[in-house]
Each structure stands twice: as structure tokens, then as C-alpha cells.
Amino acid sequence: MSCYIIEGGNRLEGAVNISGSKNASLPIIAASILNGSVTKLYNVPNIHDTQITLEILKILGCKISKKSDKIIIDSKSMQKTEIPEELMRQMRSSVVLAGAIIGRFKNTTISYPGGCDIGARPIDLHLKGFKRLGIDVEEDAGYIKCKCEKIVGNTIQLDFPSVGATENIMLASVLAEGETTITNAAMEPEIVDLQNMLNKMGAKVVGAGTNIIKITGVKKLKEVSYTVMPDRIEAGTFLCAGAITGGKIKLNNIVPEHLSPIIHKLEECGCKIEIERNSIKLDAPKKLKAVDIKTMPYPGFPTDMQSIFTTILTVGKGTSLIVENIFENRYKYTNELKRMGAKITVEGKTAVVKGVRRLTGANVTSTDLRGGASLVLAGLQAKGKTTVNNIEYILRGYEKLDRKLSLLGAKITLK
């Protein structure tokens, strides 16, 4: 098992480039199935989740090659439609492949997906959406079989603005007959990125970024080259790393408007932020101020940033109140922060954080992807040595995290 060893107490300074978005790359890679042709992708992060997704495509019959910063996917010879259970169990987002496979082949077999244990994330919204498109869905002994003669556009009202369900319905319906309308759709920037990629491929999708998305089915899609958007959660993580260390950093390759709720809260904490066209500078105070946070679907404060932001508030002046409205198990990491001297009380979906002067290095264990990243940030601020174990979770979503932090002056080694 790999771990990070961190010597805390160094102020982060300098500039770092943000990688392509994990959460945009996965549905975009899935979309390469739909054209039965060549897809060239740029700015895809080299992380565990993208590697697994590409491995699944290989098993299904796609040809994949990498040239410098470009990934070439040729799905012409793909014939298999069943996703291997062992790979499905490694990450939940693999379920988004189902929509693309159904869209092209009109059938697929998947198992229930795995990933981080941060709470109930049922895929019933995905399956309800498929059924509304005329797809027969049969659940049997842990497997889900989807098949149909043809996919017919329909109106699909989501009970909750699920990102995964929105993406899966988009992928399943671009080659459908007629028009599909998704209401109460997720509005995240990653949905917009998927729409832009699909449209460049010849699809007819409008409305991404709003709560109503309309997809007019087309007969065929074409070859495409596409550059994936920057990762707003990685950007938020590095901004928080600068903040917790009292640092002064610059992030390149970002979209500032994607970071608005994070920037707003960092400014409330006392950070000075300077925004440029595709970069951002943060100058942190010696002592952060306490703030309150409620996670909400986009454009609200992102649930993926909750654990990371809570961590910087453990050393803020005063008491902060955190409300997690998306995933009920997202506070597991707080027990590890307590080992480092954090004062956090969790009750239901609320956490009360009383700031301390400084954290203390300890031996801690990642419980999920973002919770693991939060422990790394805690280690950067803590007095003494911190060992973060079980970092396989972190490697799922961050590209070269230790190297990038080292560039900013952190003392962190991967072992």
C-alpha cells in the first residue's frame, strides 16, 4: 500500500498548472463509443479513474493509443457490450459507459458500480431515465441488463439533479429517434463540456448549464478532436492548500467562473484573490477566519470540496458550521482529522468545527478520494510528520499531487 509522508509547516509559494478534469474526462471518454470512429482527446488527466475507463474500452474492443498529450480512441471494431464486473466495482462513474453502449448497440449488461463509500448513490435515476427512452431494464443477481429495439426520445423529469444520470441520459439519447428533454438536469460545468464534445461530434444538444437539456436524435456521429476542461476540484484543492499554509500561489489553466463558490468562501476566510482570464492568484492571511458552508448542487458550494474546505477551517479563528446536503457519509475523514488535534463535532449532516492554532502530525488513513486529499492538506499545516495511508483513493482523482505540491515548496514524498 502506498502512502504520503509529509513534513508540515512550509508556506506554499509559486505557480502550478491544473490538470484536465476527472469528472469531465470520464463521460467524454465514454462518448467516444458513440461515433464508431476515431476520437482524439487532449488534457485528459493520467489518473487511476481514466486509466480504468480506458482499460474497459480496450476490453470492449476499442483500440487506444497515446501520443504525447493526446489519447486516440478508435471504437470502430468494438463489439462487446458487457462491462467486466471487477472493473465496474473499482469506480462508480463507470456506470456512465452504459448510456454510451446502449446508445450505439441498443443493449448492455453492467453490475452495480463501486467507488468511494461516501453514502447511498443509487443508480435508480439512471435506470428510470433509460426506461423512459423505451429501454427494457432487468435487474438480476447484482447485474443490470438493458436492451431495446430502438431508443425513442421522451421527456425525463429527474427527481434530483444527478450529474451521472444527466450524463447517461444524454449519451443514450443522442442517436435516438425524436427529441429527448431532461428537466431538473444537473447544471455542472462538466455537463456543458460533455455537450460541447457531443456537438463537435455531430450531436444536437442544447441547454447544458441550465436545468433543461434538449437532445435531438441524429442518425450518425463523426470523428472528433476535443480538449477536456480544467479540473475545478483540483484547482479548489490547491487554493485551499495555499490558504491552510498561509501561502501565496498562482494556478494556471483554470476557468475562474467554475470556482466562484470556492473563491467566495476563501475571501470570507480572509484570503486575497486576484483573477485573470485563465489563472488565479491567492494570498492567504496568517490566520484564516471561520465561515459557514452548505453543500448544494451547482452553482452552489460543491460537495467534492466539503472535506477539503472543512480541513482549512480546523485552523480558522472561531467556530464554523458545515452542512452536507448531498452525501450522508461524507464526514468519515473527520475522525482522522481529530487524530491530528482538530476539534470537530458531527451530528447527522452537520459538522461544527472549532478552530485550533495548529494541527499535529499523525499516522492517518484515507477513507475516500476527497477525504484523503483533505488529510494531505492537514499534513501540510501540521507540526511534525504526517503519514497519509491508503492513498489509492487519492490517486483516483489527482494527477501528480505530490510533485505539484513539492513545486510549491511542500515537503511531501510518495512511498
Image: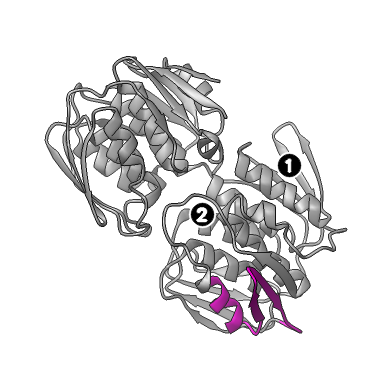
Q: Position of residue 274 (x, y in %)?
A: 31, 32
> Please, is residue 334 above or below residue 119 in the view?
above
383 lies left or right of 38 = left
**Magenta-span inclusion, residue 143:** yes
- Residue 369: in magenta span: no
Q: Which amino acid type is shown beneath numbered disc 1?
A: Ile
Where residue 188 sits in the image (x, y, percent)? 45, 57
- Residue at horizontal 46 percent and vertical 22 percent from the top: 405
Q: Identify the image quadrant of residue 256.
A: top left
Q: Which mark is residue 190?
A: 2
Extent of the magenta region: 126-150
- The amino acid pointed to by label 2 is Glu
Q: Is residue 105 left or right of residue 227?
A: right
Q: Is residue 48 visible?
A: yes
Question: Which residue sits at x=25%, y=42%?
Answer: 265
Judging by the rendered image, the residue that carries numbered circle 1 is 71
